[in-house]
Structure formats: structure tokens, C-alpha cells
């Protein structure tokens, strides 16, 4: 894999010629618009085929995969333009293998709401070990409220990703609620009722495991939360299923703040089979313009986490989105707009501005002025920033990564992932 940064005057054609690759495939892999428009400073991912196959009449993905001793999932991973589809036409050219030396194997999880675009989901699922539909919540009386997850479960199974149930304290209005966590963690009867409902849902829906995300817990409930997780794990493991928990991005045991105090890394790590470090949202809706996941901040969380939790239990959280802030930023007034990484590139093209790169944060950004004269700051992810984050998996020896989330398109997320790692089924 090579990551090319577009320079002034370059086109898909001139870049493809420079590297000796097919320009049509280069554009399709990177989702360049039909008019070929590029922004100065945007990244293009180039992968170099070692074995190509031209589809013949009557061949299917399954028959082609079998003839080369690989899986259909690997064919999908090697051919982003397939979009997770099985549709082939005679004359189509598929990449069977690339000239790549991967860093090792890793597991990858992605989160999706039920209203995710099904075509987008189908394209992303082959790059995932797990799919986690978001989210089963808890009602005001401590019961489980359901999720319309049928389509997600079907899609996951069709493309070889294992579904994971997600349990959170998100309310019907879409906000995390401390009170509902308190109710579950302090009332034994309600906790018992909720656990019974969760286990029954996992059994009926065929989930491979459970991912628990209780946020904004007071420190006084840290021990009760770890005990609750330990109880869940014992019950799930007895059924051949696993338990994960999401952790706020801490850098020390005594880090103050409601987001952090209820998450005891050592206790939670001992109580579960794996954790997701929520290593994103330094740049956020209500905060000042900055990178969503600056690399030094991510490293600081990992440095602390691996001291408290075995690395093989850790999933690194990776953002698949960016933010657009109107300027000037005014605390408690300004609100950023969440956008896809692809949309960020489109904005740079639309307003004719160059994308810059912060070498410290390892994150792209740019400024533009809209039609009303308002200046904007945009921070997002590109192939360079994703490459820097995903290399931390091998660097720290952690289990893999969890992508928040799958709702926004960006092919480079998956091109980089598949180039760096053999994705575990």
C-alpha cells in the first residue's frame, strides 16, 4: 500500500501513470467523483495487484475463491468496488492478491444504527470480524427496551461478521442516563430482571456476545459496575458467549470527571473478555476545533490501558467521521456539524481549498468560507491518520479496533485496514 497526497495539477490519470496502476480502479477504490475532481492535499490509497483474475462466463465469487484457495470474504476485501455484492459480469477483473506485507492479524468491530444504508453496510461488513447494532437500552423501570435489528443481523451473517448485542444506558430520547445505570447497579431485583432479559435476547437473536456501555457513572459505583460485568461474564461464558465493555479514554486511575470515575480499568479489565477504548471525541460538537482523535492523546490512553489490562483484551476505538465548525468559536454557543470523511473532501473540492495535515495530531484539516461569508474549520480522518492509528494495534499488541461508526461512507478506512492486517473471521 502507498498513500499518495495529491499535489496541485495532478489528476487520477497522472497519479495512476506515475505508479503504474489502473486509473479506473484507483478512482473506484478511493471513490473519486465521476468528474475526477481532486482536492490538493487529499489522500489516495494505492494497492498493487500481484494476481488478477478476469471473470469468465458462468463463474461466481464462490467458484473463483475456491479455485485460488481463498474465501469470498477475502475477495470482497481485495475488491472494494464489489461493494460486498456477488454480482459479476464476464470480463470483470478481480484482484486475488496484492504485493503487501501485513503487520499481522487483528479483529475489527463496527457499530451501526438500524437505519444504516444497507448498500453501504454490505460493502463494509467483509472487513469486520464483528458487527454491533446500536443499541439496546434500559427503560425507566429497569427493563430492556428492544432494537429493530433484523436487517443488521441478516446482513452480518450473509457476509461473515459475528453479531454482538449492545447494551447501554441510552434513553429513548438518545441521551446517556446516569440514573438508569444507578437503578440497575443498586437494585438487585431489577438487575436480575435485566440480566434475564438480556440473556434471553442473546439466545433468541443468536448474538455471539454482549458489549456493555454504561457511561457517566459516579466513582461510587465503580466497584458495583465491575461486579455487574463479572456476573454477566460468568453467565455468558457458560453459554459459550463473550462479554465486552466500553471504557472512557483515561490516562490515570484517579482521572477526575463523571465520564471517567466510574470506569476502573483494572477491575473492568479483569471482569470482561475484552474492552473498547473510546479513543475519540477530543474534538467534539460543543468543543473548539481540533482533531477528533489526536495521536498523542490516543497513545496516552493506550500507555495507561496496557498497564492495567492485558493488551490482548483491548480494542482501540477509531473514529470514522469528522467535524465542521463555524467560526469564530464561542464556548457554549458554537456547535460543530458531524460529517463523513468523504464529505470533508467534497467540501475542500467545492470551495477550492487545500487540505493541510497536522503532523503532531496526525490529522488532516482545512478552512473554508461558505456562501454567506462564514468561515469554517474542518477536522477529519484520511488514509494517513487512519494508518497512524491502526499501526498502534501491532505496536501495542492489542486485539484490534472498533470503528465508530459505520453510518458514513469512506472507502479509505477499509483499504488501509485490509492493507495492514489479515482480518480475523
Image (cartoon, grey):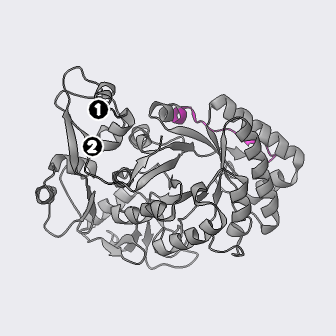
Q: Residues within 10 Å of mark 2 (few under 14, many from 20)?
A: some
Q: Looking at the image, which is closer to me, 37 or 185?
A: 185
Q: Which mark is residue 23?
A: none
- Circle nearer the N terminus (1, 2): 1
Q: Residues within 10 Å of mark 1 (few under 14, many from 20)?
A: few
Residue 68's tag is: 1
Q: CA distance from mark 1 to mark 2?
A: 10 Å
Q: Identify the secondary structure beneath mark 2.
A: strand
Marks 1 and 2 close (CB-CB < 8 Å): yes
Picture layout, residue 363 above or below residue 424:
below
Magenta span of residues: 140-153
Image check: 133 left or right of 52? right
- Is residue 141 located in the magenta-colored stretch of the structure? yes
Q: Residue at x 66, y 56 (%)?
A: 175
Tell me if residue 147 comes above or below residue 320 in the rendering: above
Q: Position of residue 165 (x, y in %)?
A: 63, 41
Q: Quadrant of the N terminus?
A: bottom left
To which residue does mark 2 refer?
A: 97
Amino acid at each position: 500500500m502507498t498513500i499518495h497526497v495529491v499535489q496541485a495539477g495532478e489528476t487520477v490519470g497522472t497519479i495512476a501513470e506515475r505508479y503504474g496502476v489502473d486509473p479506473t480502479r484507483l478512482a473506484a477504490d478511493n471513490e473519486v467523483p465521476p468528474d475526477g475532481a481532486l482536492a490538493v492535499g487529499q489522500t489516495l490509497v494505492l494497492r498493487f495487484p500481484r494476481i488478477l483474475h478476469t471473470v469468465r462466463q458462468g463463474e461466481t465469487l464462490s467458484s473463483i475463491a475456491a479455485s485460488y484457495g481463498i474465501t469470498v470474504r477475502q475477495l470482497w476485501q481485495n475488491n472494494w468496488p464489489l461493494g460486498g455484492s456477488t454480482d459479476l459480469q464476464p470480463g470483470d477483473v478481480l484482484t486475488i492478491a496484492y504485493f503487501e506485507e501485513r503487520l499481522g492479524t487483528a479483529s475489527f468491530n463496527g457499530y451501526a444504527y438500524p437505519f444504516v444504508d444497507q448498500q453501504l453496510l454490505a460493502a463494509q461488513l467483509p472487513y469486520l470480524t464483528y458487527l454491533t447494532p446500536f443499541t439496546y437500552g434500559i427503560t425507566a423501570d429497569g427493563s430492556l427496551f428492544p432494537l429493530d435489528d433484523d436487517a443488521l443481523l441478516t446482513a452480518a451473517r450473509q457476509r461473515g461478521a459475528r453479531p454482538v448485542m449492545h447494551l447501554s444506558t441510552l434513553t429513548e430520547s438518545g441521551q446517556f442516563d446516569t440514573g438508569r445505570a444507578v437503578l440497575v447497579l443498586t437494585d438487585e431485583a431489577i438487575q436480575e430482571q435485566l440480566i434475564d432479559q438480556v440473556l434471553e435476547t442473546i439466545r433468541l437473536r443468536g448474538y455471539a456476545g454482549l458489549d456493555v456501555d454504561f457511561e457517566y457513572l459516579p466513582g461510587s459505583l465503580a466497584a458495583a459496575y465491575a461486579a455487574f460485568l463479572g456476573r454477566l461474564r460468568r453467565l455468558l461464558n457458560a453459554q459459550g458467549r463473550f462479554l465486552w465493555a466500553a471504557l472512557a479514554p483515561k490516562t490515570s486511575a484517579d482521572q477526575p470527571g463523571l465520564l471517567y470515575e466510574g470506569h476502573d480499568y483494572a477491575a473492568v479489565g479483569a471482569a470482561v473478555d475484552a474492552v473498547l477504548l473510546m479513543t475519540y471525541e477530543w474534538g467534539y460538537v460543543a468543543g473548539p476545533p481540533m482533531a477528533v482523535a489526536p495521536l498523542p492523546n490516543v497513545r496516552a490512553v493506550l500507555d495507561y490501558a496496557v498497564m492495567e489490562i492485558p493488551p490482548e483484551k483491548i480494542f482501540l476505538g477509531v473514529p470514522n467521521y469528522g467535524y465542521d465548525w463555524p467560526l469564530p468559536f464561542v464556548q457554549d454557543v458554537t456547535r460543530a456539524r458531524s460529517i463523513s470523511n468523504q464529505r470533508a473532501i467534497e467540501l475542500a473540492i467545492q470551495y477550492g481549498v487545500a487540505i493541510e495535515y497536522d503532523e503532531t495530531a496526525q490529522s488532516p484539516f482545512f478552512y473554508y468560507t461558505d456562501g454567506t461569508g462564514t468561515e469554517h474549520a474542518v477536522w477529519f480522518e484520511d488514509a494517513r491518520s487512519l494508518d497512524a492509528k491502526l499501526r498502534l494495534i501491532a505496536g501495542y499488541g492489542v486485539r484490534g479496533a472498533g470503528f465508530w461508526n459505520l453510518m458514513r461512507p469512506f472507502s479509505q478506512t477499509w483499504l488501509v485496514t485490509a492493507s495492514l492486517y489479515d482480518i480475523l473471521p
